[in-house]
Amino acid sequence: MAVDFKNYSRKMEKTLDVLAENFGAVRAGRANAKVLDRITVEYYGSETPLNGVATISSPDARTLVIQPWDAKLLKDIQKAIQVSDLGINPQNDGRVIRLTFPQLTEERRKDLTKQVKKYAEEGKVAMRNIRRDGMDYIKNLKKKSEITEDEQKKAEKDLQDLLDKYIKKVDEALAAKEKELMAI
């Protein structure tokens, strides 16, 4: 009997997706609408993502322009951006909100690099926990005599290979993001 790892593979893939989202929220000195994905505004009594109440555009490499569909939201959007961890002060001209991304200092680049390394390590820990669950599942199958000892060893090796493949993907994503952050 072959042990099915689709479920564990799916969970690791989801962990990669979360990591990509976290990396996308870290700004690299260029205007990127993804940094606003986590910001929500109260709209008709419920928290709504910013891109659900406004048009977000990037007229140049360092500026984002947020144009709310309802002008009454301007102040709420401005306040939501100010209390977020973006570190950018929004300019409100009465019609749109402009976010100007400053050139990153060397110190800020290093801080952001530490932050993405932390995200990568959290992703790896989550994947190792998924592997541990898989190993427990395999040991349980062996205990119930549903698989032989040879099948157990092969399944454990296959699960470790799966983890190694995903850890490599995390390392590649981290290297790409670090390169992006350190580029001037």
Image: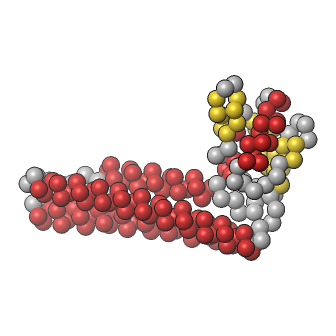
Nearer-the-camera pick, 26 or 177: 26
Residue occupying image coordinates x 58% and y 55%:
22
Classify 152 as above or below 50: below
Quadrant occupied by the C terminus:
bottom right
Extreme residue toward the front, this view: 83
Residue occupying image coordinates x 57% and y 71%:
175
- Colour basis: secondary structure
Q: Position of residue 39 (x, y in %)?
A: 68, 44
Residue occupying image coordinates x 27% and y 64%:
158
Nearer-the-camera pick, 69 or 117: 117
Classify 98 as above or below 135: above
Q: Quadrant of residue 115?
A: bottom right
Extreme residue toward the top, this view: 44
Extreme residue toward the right, this view: 93
Q: Position of residue 102 (x, y in %)?
A: 82, 62
- Asked whether, in this view, residue 33 is left or right of residue 123, the answer is right
Residue occupying image coordinates x 20% and y 57%:
138
Classify 49 as above or below 164: above
Nearer-the-camera pick, 15 or 86: 86
Q: Tell me if residue 3 can be seen.
A: yes
Nearer-the-camera pick, 76 or 100: 76
Number of numbered markers: 0
Q: Position of residue 179 (x, y in %)?
A: 64, 71
- Asked whether, in this view, residue 154 is left or right of residue 9, the answer is left
Q: Tell me if residue 170 can be seen.
A: no
Q: Position of residue 48 (x, y in %)?
A: 65, 34
